[in-house]
Amino acid sequence: MWSTKLEEECFIEYGNGPENLKSVTATMAQLTVDNEQAAQYLHRAELLDLKPGEQYSYRIINKGSNVKSGIFKFRFPHNENKSHSFLVVADMGTLTKSLQFMVHEALNGLYEVVFHVGDIAYNLNTEGGSIGDHFMRRVSKFTSSIPYMTTPGDHERAHSFYHYCYRFSMPNAPWPMSEDSLWYSLNIGYTHFISINTEYFYLQSAYKQLQIDWLKKDLTEANKLRDSVPWIIVMAHKPLYCTKSEMEQECQEENSYLRDSLEDLFFEHGVDLIISGHKHCYERSWPMYMSRAFQLNYINPLAPIYIVIGAMGYEYMADKQKSSPFWLAFAMSDREKELFARLNVVNKTHLVWSVHASMTNEDVDDVQVIQTKHGSFGEPGAKALEKMKPRTGGSRNLPPEPFHFVDAINIDYQYQPFILSATVFTISCVLFLFLRHSKVRKVLRL
């Protein structure tokens, strides 16, 4: 896709070699809302018969003037039985300090796809569309070479997602996109990716049920293919779970619109990972369901893992964590460290999720998920908690109640398992010494 100030008919010339060129005429649409300062004409061309793993060159040609763009290159994502790497960001806009660093990161040859999980540009329609144009120009250095897959967020919601529908084109949807097609799925290698529009869960809209019906069908079909495409990862801008923070978030409430609609579905269909943004920080949960951690590791998770990676939005607002729920494995909110993630799906049983400071590439978080039993986590509902107790060694690995918060102002989350173990050990020692007392033993015998 590309944009022009004038109404011009264009086509693309492309191929995987100078003697194998094809051409396709572009479709054109005009921005008519919040367009005073924007390049008002948008163009989209669909390239056909692309082969996985092949490198292609292309250029844009104006039919009337025969003016040609420079030559761009991209490699179509492969589907071979080897690792696949993806770059993941959220809440990234024109004020993001490390935006230029992210452009270079995306171009380093590591990634097959860049996923942007909502809140794009801040905002696409702001200042008559000029903010959207400015952002798209800056990221075009990598979007011209790497697939840029987006998920709508609350900052795309203006005028019924108008600018989002025109500026982007996602799979299985017409273009310009319509409000009833702002969700999609696709398979890349070992992974079935799903992108949903979380805004519809807060609106009185028929699109909410349409999306849920589509999601149920998509997850059902995806589970039929788990022998060959075992991982299921969902991109959803607003998170189902988050900690308490300075900014009131619906995800920190005991009753959540998103959890009511989606959590049972994700559990029943064995969704491995749910990646969100919206909250401007970084948070990673243990495998969890119904506000409870099912285990304190990532070896054959018994429930979905929830991640918030909204730390590219610090320049707009930083969310400081004010709670440490039992299910939280790791968290960070440091305004000086804008963060991005690398998702490396190694094979059918192993994936690596790592988080890095975008300006320095400093390692912030790194976790390996091993899943040899892909599929449903079981029947959803309260009984799932009871079923988990014998599989997790009893109730000791479950918090006493959902949303059992403790003060977290000075807690380093990565030491939670150590603190828990030390507490249990101390209590055990006290009980042992207490029971050794002769008078206590005499009373107990009575």
Image (tube, rainbow, N blue to C red):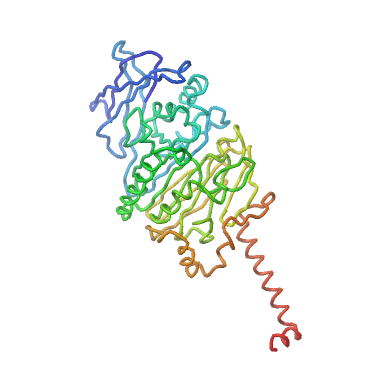
Percent across and percent down for residue 182 are: 39, 36
Q: Residue furthest top?
A: 65
Quarter of the figure with the C terminus: bottom right
Q: Nearer the viewer, residue 263 or 74?
A: 263
Say left or right for 234 vs 68: right
Picture layout, residue 338 above or below residue 128: below
Residue 103 at least partly seen? no
Q: Residue furthest front?
A: 204
- Residue drawn 48% across the image and 46% down it: 258
Q: Nearer the viewer, residue 395 or 349?
A: 395
Picture layout, residue 150 above or below residue 81: above
Say left or right for 427 vs 163: right
Percent across and percent down for residue 332 are: 60, 45
Picture layout, residue 232 above or below residue 419: above
Name which quarter of the figure residue 96 lies in: top right
Percent across and percent down for residue 250 are: 55, 44
Residue 383 at least partly seen? yes
- Residue drawn 69% across the image and 49% down it: 409
Name which quarter of the figure residue 443 lies in: bottom right
Quarter of the figure with the N terminus: top left
- Residue drawn 38% across the image and 60% down it: 373
Percent across and percent down for residue 185 are: 35, 42
- Residue drawn 46% across the image and 35% down it: 106
The number of numbered badges drawn on the structure is 0
